[in-house]
Image: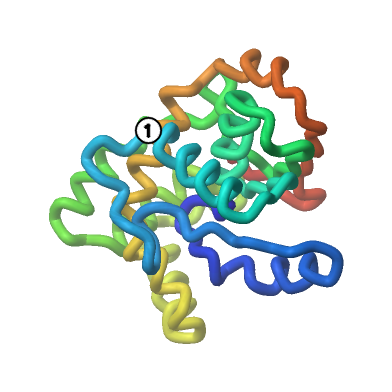
């Protein structure tokens, strides 16, 4: 299950590595690629429905989720028993406001004004480690432009900014609900990047 600003193809190398030992199905989450739009009534329950539909079609019993995909995986495991093991890499779980959304109003104003790159800068600075969050916005904007020139495929992030806002609203809505995950019957592997100092 991919995270925010990500598509299934971003996990192709990881999926190929896993496919040496498992049958792998990477879900293209709502609002991405060939999947349908998130819809006006979007919520994490819709994401969970999609995962359950894929599970029923494939018979999968193992689930891997990254970032927001990790939060979706936890919600799926909390509300069902189809998956026997769940692996989570830096799941988007907010505790006591650890993943704040005070940046969202300004971000959404920039999106409404069709200033997608400025919105991405605002989001990146809000969610970045301290060493990056101190960067002046104009400099980060320049860096992102250079990244897009060298890696054109990374421009897909600009197309996922509206989906990102909805997903972060779900993260905030589920703030401090982590106690619910005590009831998960599946085995859970929780992973955190050794070099990561990101809040999410």
In screen coordinates, is 125 left or right of 23?
Answer: left
Is 97 located above or below residue 64 in the figure?
A: above
Observer-nearest of 38 and 53: 53
Q: Residues within 10 Å of mark 1 (few under 14, many from 20)?
A: some
Model colouring:
rainbow
Return the x and y of residue 109 as percentages of the image width and height.
19, 45
Is 183 located above or below residue 61 in the figure?
A: above
Return the x and y of residue 84 as percentages of the image width and height.
77, 37
Residue at x-position 62% and y-position 28%: 80
In screen coordinates, is 106 left or right of 195?
Answer: left
Residue at x-position 71% and y-position 38%: 83
Residue 130 visible somewhere in the drawing: no
Total numbered badges shown on the rendered structure: 1
At mark 1, the secondary structure is: helix
Quadrant the C terminus occupies = top right
Residue at x-position 70% and y-position 16%: 183
Residue at x-position 58% and y-position 46%: 56
Q: Which residue is mark 1?
A: 169
Observer-nearest of 153 and 53: 53
Is 75 located above or below residue 200 in the figure?
A: above
Return the x and y of residue 138 as percentages of the image width and height.
36, 63
Return the x and y of residue 63 as percentages of the image width and height.
69, 46
Is 79 located above or below residue 144 in the figure?
A: above
Q: Quadrant of residue 176?
A: top right
Observer-nearest of 173 and 40: 40
Residue 144 visible somewhere in the drawing: yes
In the rendered image, the residue lying farthest to the right is 21
In the rendered image, the residue lying farthest to the left is 113
């Amino acid at each position: 299950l991919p995270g925010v600003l990500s598509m299934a193809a971003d996990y192709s190398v990881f999926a190929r590595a896993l496919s040496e030992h498992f049958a792998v199905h990477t879900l293209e989450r709502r609002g991405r690629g060939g999947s349908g739009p998130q819809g006006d009534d979007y919520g994490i329950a819709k994401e969970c429905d999609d995962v359950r539909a894929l599970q029923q079609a494939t018979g999968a019993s193992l689930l891997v989720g990254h970032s927001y995909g990790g939060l979706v995986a936890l919600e799926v495991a909390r509300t069902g028993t189809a998956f026997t093991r769940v692996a989570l890499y830096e799941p988007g779980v907010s505790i006591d406001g650890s993943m704040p959304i005070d940046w969202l109003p300004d971000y959404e104003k920039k999106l409404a004004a069709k200033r997608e790159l400025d919105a991405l800068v605002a989001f990146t600075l809000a969610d970045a480690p301290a060493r990056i969050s101190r960067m002046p916005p104009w400099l980060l904007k320049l860096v992102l432009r250079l990244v897009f020139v060298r890696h054109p495929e990374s421009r897909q992030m600009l197309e996922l900014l509206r989906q990102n806002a909805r997903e972060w609203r779900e993260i905030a809505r589920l703030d401090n609900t982590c106690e619910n995950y005590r009831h998960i019957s599946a085995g859970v592997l929780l992973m955190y990047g050794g070099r990561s100092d990101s809040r999410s």
